[in-house]
Amino acid sequence: MTGAPPRPADRNGAPAASRLACLTWNVHRARGSDGRVDPGRVAAALAHEACAGAPPDVLALQEADTEARPHRGLLDLGRLERETGLVHAQAAPGLRWGDESHGLHGVVVLLAARVAVAHADLLDLPGHCPRGAVVLEARVEGTPVRIVATHLALGQPLRMAQLRVVGQYLDRRPPMPTILMGDLNEWRPWGGVALSPRLLGRRFAGPAPATFPVRRPCLPLDRILATPPARVRAARVLDGPLTVAASDHRPLAAEVELPITDA
C-alpha cells in the first residue's frame, strides 16, 4: 500500500500555500452612480466583469438586501449562481435575517464549490443602523479557513464596539487562519484603533487600495484582511464600465494564501 502523495512545495522547498480568490463589493442597494436603482445592472456587472473568466472562491456583498424590514433580497441569486458558478452560502433559513432576506443586514456571501463550509454563525453588531457579520468556517482542499464578511459603521466608536464583538466571538472559536472582508468603513490605510490587535485580539493585515467614491476613489473603505500565517496578495480594485455604473463603491479583489496543513 502506497503512502499519501507529498504536499506540493514552492521553489524554496517550503510547503505550498492554498490560494483563495476573494472579492468584496458594497452594491449600495443597487443604486448606481447615476442615482438609478437597477439590481439587474449589479448582476450583469458581477457576471460579465467582476466574476468573468475566473470567478472568485469567495464573493461577499454588502447592502444586497433592502434597508427596511423585511430586509428583502435585491438580487436575482439564481441568475448569479448560474452565471458565476458560485453558490449562495446562506440558503439555510438560520443564516439569513428573515425568510425574504438573502443575507444578514445586507451581507450576502457566495462560494465556489471548493470551499466546503463546516460551521456558520451570524453576529448581530451594535449600532443604531442594522449591522452584522456572517462567519463561515470552511476547508479549502483540506486547509482550514474562517471567513468573516461584514459591513461596519461609519463612526469609529461604533466600529470599535462592533469589532470588539467580532474579536470576542473569535476568542471562543477554534484557532485557524481568518479572513475579514467587506465594507469596513475605515479610511485610514493603517486601520485605526478599530482594527488594532489590542482591540481585536489578533492582527489582521492586507493592502488598502482606495475603493470609494466610485468615480475617483480616494478612500480605502473596503478591505480584505487576513491573520498570519495567511497572507493577502495581489489586491486590486475593479473598474469595468458596468461595475463603475452599478454602485457608489468599486469592488476589491485579492488573493489570500493559506498555509497547507496536514490536519
Image (tube, rainbow, N blue to C red):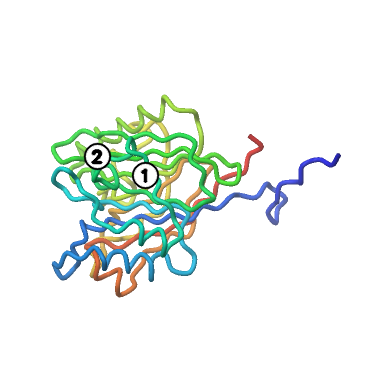
The amino acid sitting under disc 2 is: Gly
Of the pair 3 and 39, the residue shown nearer to us: 39
Residue drawn at x 30%, y 35% as measured from the top left: 163
In the image, farthest residue toward the right: 1
Residue 84 vertical position relative to residue 14 in the rendered view, above or below: below
Residue drawn at x 36%, y 28% as measured from the top left: 169
The amino acid sitting under disc 1 is: Ala
Residue drawn at x 14%, y 43% as measured from the top left: 69
Element carrying mark 2? loop
Q: Position of residue 230 (x, y in %)?
A: 52, 44
Q: How many marks?
A: 2
Q: Which mark is residue 243?
A: none
Q: Earlier in the sequence, mark 1 or mark 2?
A: 1
Element carrying mark 1? loop
Q: Position of residue 159 (x, y in %)?
A: 24, 39
Quadrant housing the C terminus: top right
Of the pair 59 and 75, the residue shown nearer to us: 75
In the image, farthest residue toward the bottom: 241
Q: Position of residue 150 (x, y in %)?
A: 31, 44
Q: Which residue position is annotated with label 1?
A: 91
Quadrant housing the N terminus: top right
Of the pair 61 and 193, the residue shown nearer to us: 61
Residue 139 vertical position relative to residue 170 in the rendered view, above or below: below
Mark 2 surroundings: few (<14), some (14-19) or many (≥20) residues within 10 A: some
Residue drawn at x 20%, y 66% as measured from the top left: 38
Residue 244 vertical position relative to residue 251 in the rendered view, above or below: below
Q: Is residue 20 left or right of residue 83?
A: right
Q: Position of residue 205 (x, y in %)?
A: 42, 46
Snapshot quadrant of residue 212: bottom left
Q: Which residue position is annotated with label 2?
A: 98
- The answer for how far apart the CA atoms under marks 1 and 2 are is 11 Å
Mark 1 surroundings: few (<14), some (14-19) or many (≥20) residues within 10 A: some
